[in-house]
Amino acid sequence: MDIVVSGIRPTGNLHLGNYFGAVKNFIKMQNEHKCYFFIADYHSLTTHPTPADLHGNVKNVLVNFLAAGLDPEKATLYIQSDIPEVTELYLLLNMNAYLGELERVASFKEKVRTQPDNINAGLLTYPTLMAADVLIHKAAKVPVGKDQEQHLEMMRNFANRFNRMYKVEYFPAPVAFNFGEELIKIPGLDGSTKMSKSEGDYNAIYLSDEPEVIRKKIMRAVTDAGPTVENQPKPQPVENLFQLMKVLSTTDTYEHFNNLYNTCQIRYGDLKKQLAEDVIVFTHPFREKIKELFVNDNYLHKVASLGAEKARESTSRTIREVREIIGFKVF
Ligand code: ADP
């Protein structure tokens, strides 16, 4: 059993891609490891949300992840800003984080390029805060995508540097959590290979979408004029719809439409209608749960308090030990 930490960015509702690509793995992980999942609201301040947006975004992801199946009893699910020890470790790690290495981080360089008018110190030190998030629990593993490998490398550098500087074997150097199976990638409805919330309203289907919205989005999905030769390869947008069907519909349904395609008898309208109904059935329990949780502030308060209490068992211990190692002494 490993100690695993994963941050959740408070950015909008979960779509099917997030669910199959990330959340389903979290749900599996929480049964097998000691998992800490936190909503990264400190991190989100780099983009300066309004107070109402900040709270709304955190509530939204909390509700979505609970509805999707994260279990606050099994995992430790907490809000980053409820744990002041994280900020203390962030400050301490920053004393040994060098400007050169922070400036070299690809995601930072990308921000410098895309938003030159908001390059703040929080963005520069994003990797130190990420390291603090993980090291505060002395975690061994972090479930990350390829794009996060550099951040993970920095966490290891900060951990090893601290150990060397104080001649201790204190922080473990975290490695990537390997799911051990091929990750499912969910395609977008607009013909793009990836469902993503940054690709506009008609690319992604959210767990919270109402049936009417789901029907509308799927009916608008991109297709082509239809096959003219038997067994011809499917162009990307059509392949996308079949891929969604493979994940969400029964094998029989998939085979039925696949045969119609291969014999040039397919009517995309029928395929879309069927896919929409299957998506509606699949998302039904999530949609209902999201609505129920949204109006249950009392329960959300309990979840957040329980999470903070469980998280602080390790964060307060780590900070106490780190302060001692560094040489802070009580007079
Ligand atoms: P988005 O691209 O919509 O902003 P994020 O980058 O916030 O999504 O991704 C959050 C998590 O969901 C990541 O772990 C990512 O790998 C996963 N994810 C996002 N989109 C997909 C997708 N289309 N298929 C599979 N996994 C996805």
Image (spheres, rainbow, N blue to C red):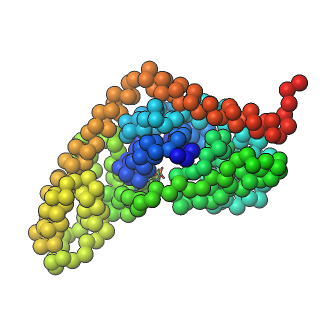
- Residue extending farthest to the bottom is 229
Q: Count every numbered label the image shows and give the total.
A: 0
Q: Residue furthest top?
A: 298
What residue is shown at x 55% (from left), y 60% (from top)?
A: 147
Q: Find residue 255 and report its horizontal and vertical position in percent.
A: 16, 63
Name the image quarter holding the C terminus: top right
Query: Eyeballing the image, is 134 above or below 310?
Result: below
Q: Is residue 198 visible?
A: yes
Task: From the viewer's perspective, tell me whether residue 162 is left or right of residue 259.
Answer: right
Quick one: 145 or 198, which is closer to the camera? 145
Describe residue 91's horizontal placement relative to residue 27 as left or right: right
Q: Is residue 227 above or below residue 85?
A: below
Q: Is residue 9 visible?
A: no
Residue 301 higher or lower than 286, as above or below:
above
Q: Is residue 124 above or below residue 70?
A: below
Q: Nearer the viewer, residue 300 or 163?
A: 163
Q: Looking at the picture, how far across and down is residue 326, in whole percent?
A: 82, 40
- Residue plotted at (15% across, 78% down): 230
Residue 299 lies in what quarter of the image?
top left
Q: Quadrant of residue 180?
A: bottom left
Task: Give residue 70's position: percent from left, percent from top.
Answer: 42, 38
Q: Residue furthest front?
A: 1
Q: Is residue 276 left or right of residue 102?
A: left
The percent position of residue 37, horizontal first and vertical second, equals: 52, 40
Which one is in front, 199 or 106? 106
Q: Residue at x 35, y 54 (%)?
A: 203
Identify the residue shown where x is 19% and y is 54%. 250
Residue found farthest to the right: 331
